[in-house]
Amino acid sequence: MRRVYLDNNATTRTDPGVVAKMLPFFSDDFGNASSSHGFGIEVSGAVREARRSVQALLGAAHDHEIVFTSGGTESDNAAIMAGLAAREGRDEIVTTAVEHPAILSLVEHLKETRGVTVHFIGVDARGRIDLDAFRAAVGPKTAIVSAMWANNETGTLFPVEELALVAHEAGALFHTDAVQAVGKIAIDLKATQIDFLSLSGHKLHGPKGIGALYVRKGAKFAPFIRGGHQERARRGGGTENTPGIVGLGAAAELARLRLQEDAAHIMALRDRLERGLTQKIDRCRVSGDVDNRLVNTCNIAFCDIEGEAALTHLDRAGIAASTGSACTAGSTEPSHVLRAMNVPEEALHGAIRFSLSRENTIAEIDEVLDTLPSIVARLREIARASRQVEAPLLTN
Ligand code: PLP
């Protein structure tokens, strides 16, 4: 059975060209990048090249502003902790209600264990940040502001350049979780006031377990992991993951070179999918800021179905998507992002996120358009029938 993968915000396939570039670093080029002999020097040259590729993708001013980490979660944690440590006498964090758990669970932990005050800024029905509430929350007690560039569930883009200015006016540092944005939108950090930016290799056709934190030159930074002197003593994370670093560099280079071409291809597919589904299926609505979102993300809430059930049927048909909701033992919690957007209750449980990549084709999209409408119809029929069975019971 041919399989269709539309869950690229969860992870992407590592590009075969990226894998080819990584392979020698598992064998012939095995040196430790910190060693001063020939084996190490060869490898440290490849690390430098990878750092420059990430720098170019981000439009960063200096290559040493790129610190390699184990991925998006570590970069997010490192930025928040550095921001708190950097601003003595300030013990407040401003973030948003729709961040990834990599931010939300850390700030909740800091609230409970360190008495840090956290302001969670809300969003409107399209997922746009409440700018008035944001401006009101950032003040002389704010140590760090953290707002994602692109939402992983809806693709909605936040105006992070503007948010960074507000943070700086109040003397706070600004971090953005750009894990979903990097490689999908053009970024020129030189032209912004962003202090810290997180990215992750496996979201842009690079390998898993590698990411980076951009640390603006001059921004006060304390390492999150202490140990050796790797990454100019900003991440003492032990011997560098050189195959991963080389892979991230290769993926960044590919993303930069293909950005426009990929975006046009992906957007055409996403629009075909969205138009087709909303035409073929009644009582559904697109979630997110349709005028300002990632080209690859389409989150549709279908009334009166369970998204999880639809996904199971799609999976049997060889199509992989996601709900974007967190499944906890035995129960499916609706997404905190859609809740923050006040998605109506009858649609909240029926959300499906399709996230595309450059590897998808028109034929794959048409397969979804041929498959999903009958799944939704069947699930709605089952829901209607079970309501009819329950109704007499409830009146007794
Ligand atoms: N931030 C966002 C917005 C994400 O979507 C993800 C991954 O889903 C992460 C952070 C975590 O990235 P990683 O898997 O590299 O730790």
Image (cartoon, rainbow, N blue to C red):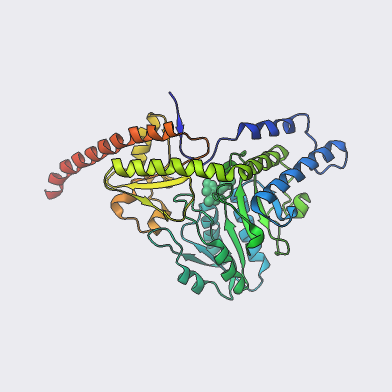
Q: Is residue 64 left or right of residue 177?
A: right
Give how far across and how far down residue 148 sits, in percent.
53, 57
Which of the 4 image quarters holds residue 246?
top right
Q: Looking at this rendering, what residue extends furthest in the bottom direction?
A: 140
Which of the 4 image quarters holds residue 253?
top right
Q: Looking at this rendering, what residue extends furthest in the right direction?
A: 37
In front of the other: 82 or 268: 268
Total marks drawn?
0
* Picture layout, residue 140 above or below residue 361: below
In front of the other: 117 or 396: 117
In front of the other: 374 or 219: 374
Indicate the quadrant containing the N terminus: top left, top right, bottom left or bottom right. Answer: top left
Residue at the (38%, 49%) spot, across then down: 333
Give how far across and how far down residue 62 sits, in percent.
74, 56
Residue at the (33%, 46%) spot, across then down: 350
* Picture layout, residue 367 above or below residue 259: above
Q: Looking at this rendering, what residue extends furthest in the top direction?
A: 1
Give how far across and how far down residue 39 sits, in percent.
84, 36
* Picture layout, residue 195 above or below residue 186: below
Q: Is residue 136 left or right of residue 373?
A: right
Residue at the (23%, 41%) spot, across then down: 383
> Is residue 330 visible from the viewing direction of this image?
no
> Is residue 79 visible from the viewing direction of this image?
yes
Which of the 4 image quarters holds residue 19?
top right
* Picture layout, residue 179 above or below residue 2: below
In front of the other: 88 or 368: 368
Q: Is residue 149 left or right of residue 246?
A: left
Give how far across and how far down residue 10 sits, in percent.
50, 42
